[in-house]
Amino acid sequence: MNLAVDHPLMLLALVLALLPLLNNGVSESAYPAVQVLPFDGLSTLISVLIKCIAFSAIVCLVLGLAGLNRGEQQRERIGYGAHIVLLLDRSKSMDYTFAGKAPDGSEESKARAAKRLLTEFIKGRDHDRIGVAGYSTSPLLFMPLTENKQAVLAAISATDLPALAYTNISKGLAMALSFFQSQSSQSGSRIILLVSDGAAVIDPDSEAKIRRWVKQMNIRLYWIFMRSQNSPGLYEKPEDPRDDNAAAMPERYLNLFFESLNIPYKAYQAENPDAVQKAINDINQLENMPLHYLEKIPKQELSTLCYQLAGFFIGLLLALKFVEARV
Amino acid sequence: MSENNIFHYRKPAQYNVFPGAHSGKVIGNGLVFNQHKPLIAFPDPRHLDLRASFLNPFSHYQVRVFRQLSRLDVFLLADLSASMSFTGKYSKKQIIVDCLFSAAESAHATGDRFGFVGCGQTLDPQLLISPASQQYGRVVDIATRIKSSRLTGRADGLLQAANYLPDRSALVFLLSDFYLPMAMVRQIMRRLNQHMVVPLVIWDKQESSDLPAWGLLKFSDLELGKTRTLLMRPSLREKIYASYLNRKQQLRKCFRSFGAEPLFIEQGFQAELISQYFFQYATS
């Protein structure tokens, strides 16, 4: 319970709360001799009570004005799971089926299949912190790492929108890595789950950066490659050695690049939704390590409560004003 | 001023040589027989008493000697402390003024001399009427002065008032609300011991019995600056009334110990009240 205020200067007005201690505010009438009046316990009690009520009313008002809140808090939690960043390919080709056609109703698109299967995957993992990012021409931030399952599911379902143009995987990876950058301590495993149906060339600048970050952050990388029919696979070697370059065979070279990172890495080449499902089940089993993290409890506004209390106290005072007797 | 503004009072004037309306001990022309004296001692043959002379064993001529009716000094000592500015059903200030006029007129009508001492925190020479001055204008002047002034302070002046009274026994009306400490009341009475004191206790029903039965009240004291908050209810009202009755009893006891009977004025000033008082208690 650490209380905080938005406008600390306002607290100076708390001095005003001392005013009712000097005068209880009941309208006065002149009297020649109060010493003749007998002592009355109930009256004294009421007088003290009025002062207390007025004091509390002013304190509540000032605290309300100062914006009292229960400051942002963190709760330490331990669970079994991992930090997972889902990096989704939002390029145009994801809107086609595995057969490389526009979906006609009998078959679902790759993006749809990925969404469906990932949703199930997320539902099955209770203690993970999951972030969602996408990439196309530019990286897209969907949801930072969070333990809030509903937010993640919503983010996943938002990826269903019609896709954009190109595949800029290096920027997407950079964004996925940036999710981990803000984490101070390493606990649980850090996973990037890349779901894509194609690859692109990684420029040398990004390559260096990614190599460095991946090492620093101790990342595990899984790549679910949704292979369309007739597209080159991850492990295919071109027949013509002249075609053996990154521009012609980006998938093969990306795979090679990932392998060269010297991190736990696994690629799944899926040609249909069932294969994707299998890959996901695989990951589900692999990644279950103790996870130590701080759950954030957002700051809680208490000024409304203060105003309500102040209103209540002022109402009481008003009621007392109405029962005043006129001499 | 109406006719009934004049009240009647009685008091033996002890040794005042000036003729007036009150019985006294001075020998002179009068109707009250005092004693027989030898003609040689009181050579007034008109008052020769032949029967007494005949019965006198020494055959001295005896003369009847009478007591003279004498003049009296009447004083009004008014408490002009802040508590006297209270206005309940009746304004206490107005009561002071009424009483001043009434006493002055009554004294003049009876042929007595009237003096006034206004006692605030200190004695203000502006608010004094010496009995030597028999001008009614002075009374009117002081009445307007009291009416227009704001009363402040406490009634400490009452203790010094005795210094302004004559050595001869006078009739002193002591006008106050007597919300003073009992010790102070006693001290005042001790200082006025040689005079005949009539304490006029000015109270108001609104202070004691006419309080509201229910509700929240806050009283601020006119003199002390203290405040009291009261949650009025019938039982408390009873308690306050009882407290006033108790106070009344205490005052009565205190005054009686000095041989004075207080007159409680709670319904505004009426001259008849004082007349009645004298018919009931005062002995001549």
Image (tube, helix red, strand yellow):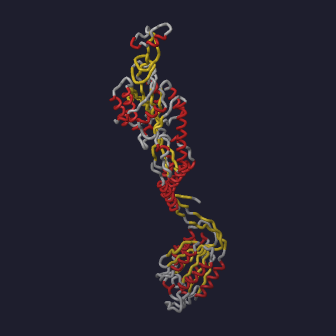
* Residue A99: image location, x then y, percent: 53, 91
Frontmost residue, A218 versus B95:
B95
| On-image quarter of the N terminus of chain B | top left
Q: Quadrant of residue A181?
A: bottom right
User: Is A172 rendered above or below residue A26?
Assistant: below
Frontmost residue, A206 versus B69:
B69
* Residue A62: image location, x then y, percent: 49, 55
Total marks shown come to 0
* Residue A150: image location, x then y, percent: 56, 75
Frontmost residue, B148 versus A304:
B148
Residue B167 visible in the snapshot: no
User: Is A66 rendered above or below residue A240?
Assistant: above
User: Is A237 rendered above or below residue B272?
Assistant: below
* Residue B80: image location, x then y, percent: 43, 34
Residue B214 visible in the snapshot: yes
Frontmost residue, A288 versus A176:
A288
**Left or right for A81, reference A102:** right
